[in-house]
Image: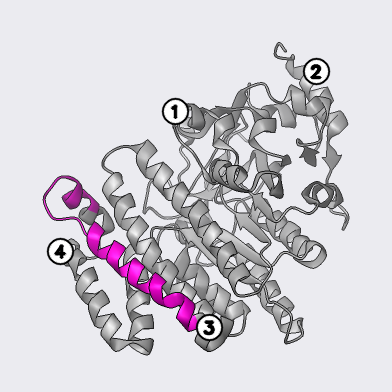
Amino acid sequence: MANAPTAILADAVREAAHPLTGDTHDYDPLLDLVGDAHFVLIGESSHGTHEFYQQRAQITKRLILEKGFTAVAVEADWPDAYRINRYIQGTGDGATAIDSLSGFKRFPTWMWRNADVLDFIGWLRDHNDSLMQDIQKIAFYGLDLYSLYSSMEAVLTYLDKIDPEAAKRARFRYGCFGDANEDPQSYGYASSFGMSESCEKEVINQLTEMQQRAGDLIARDGWLAGDEAFYAEQNARLVKNAEEYYRSMFTGRVSSWNLRDQHMAGTLTEIVNHLEHTGRQAKVVVWEHNSHLGDARATQMGDSGELNVGQLVRESYRDDVRLIGFTTYSGTVTAASNWDMPAECKNVRPALRGSYEKLFHETALPRFFLNLKFGGEITRMLQQPLLERAIGVIYRPDTERISHYFEARLSDQFDGVIHIDETRAVEPLERSAHWEQGEPPETYPTGM
């Protein structure tokens, strides 16, 4: 089919869209789309938009209460997220919800140390506290692999408690990383270019040893102790994968991107296997960026050889998966100008012509949900390639077309999309002067 003119597309989207008005039944069509699926992957087109966090939380609460979902897995480091897991299940040392977020010290802290996440964590704790003792509590996990050194420390802490001799062996193996001064990129650079030996063999041996003992611990001590064993084993798995990831950073973007998303998809599978092995139901909501959760095969990313979590989970679980994306046209966003720079409240430029965001803006609907899996004609019409915007933790409006847009076929990429035309920046728990000051509007100083 030839590409339809924009005006015809906008009319078709308007006709098919379900407006979101703030009513308690707003997401009934989305829950109908979910049906009996065990995996709902909910994206975001930026890492710093209040409405994306807020609406994902609302949807997730309904999935827990009405569809029996039992776990939330997010684009965060495993040890940091597991501190939240302990808090919401009442087994951690943190006395408050904000204490449970204390592990998020690495840039970009605002991704998880923000007001919307804090509210959601409080709700999860209250929900779990309200359950009868024999009812499965909601779990919270991180899928990412950046925590090389904190994961090594977590393994050692766990082994010190249960098996001091095994802890000695682990310390010897992990001592291989000593020359990198706890800088994973320095390790990756040195090992990639032959300046030091890689630690590949040591991290594989450590993971293998821990895997061999995991089943015995669960059989002996039950699922609660089994959770801690699983937490430690997953840290060992993360160390193995992170070691490979940091070596791959210097061999090409596609290689490192694929390793990261393969790790995240693999971690999701390990979570499911663990829950089922310990006699619990596994229905998981995943929160990540659109670029990770929309099927890469329907995007310019896939054309260049990149895969992602959405693609891998679809390939593994087929129709047991629903992929939901978020888009916005304009507003503000919390982002940095470069890596490790302070968070700023930045203006989001109106979306470019030829993009899905611009198309959705032309419907004149402020907020809507669009079913792309069972949408009939609109599903077919939105298989044509258009631009799609992606803002991560870095936002560079001056190079926006190159830095933040790629081509995609939306109805192949997602099963549903939520568009919020104007959005505002997520509020970090620690607001720097850069964030408080924000950017002047683009019409400054004329006000026109």
What's the residue type where badge 2 is placed?
A: Ile
Quadrant where the C terminus sits is top right
- Rendered location of residue 28, percent (x, y): 86, 51
Pointer 2 residue = 8
Let me know if residue 190 is in the magenta part: yes
First in sequence: mark 4 vs mark 2: 2
Can you tell which of label 1 and label 2 is closer to the viewer?
Answer: 1
Task: Measure the alpha-carbon separation of dots 4 and 3.
Answer: 39 Å
- Rendered location of residue 220, percent (x, y): 51, 87
Task: Measure the alpha-carbon separation of dots 1 and 2.
Answer: 31 Å
What's the residue type where badge 3 is placed?
A: Ala
Q: Residue furthest top?
A: 2
Give the number of the disc on residue 304.
1
Nearest the eye: 197 or 8: 197
Task: Measure the alpha-carbon separation of dots 4 and 2.
Answer: 61 Å
What's the residue type where badge 4 is placed?
A: Asp
- Asked whether residue 193 appears in the rendered view, the answer is yes
First in sequence: mark 1 vs mark 3: 3
Pointer 3 residue = 219
Report helix, strand or loop for mark 1.
Answer: loop
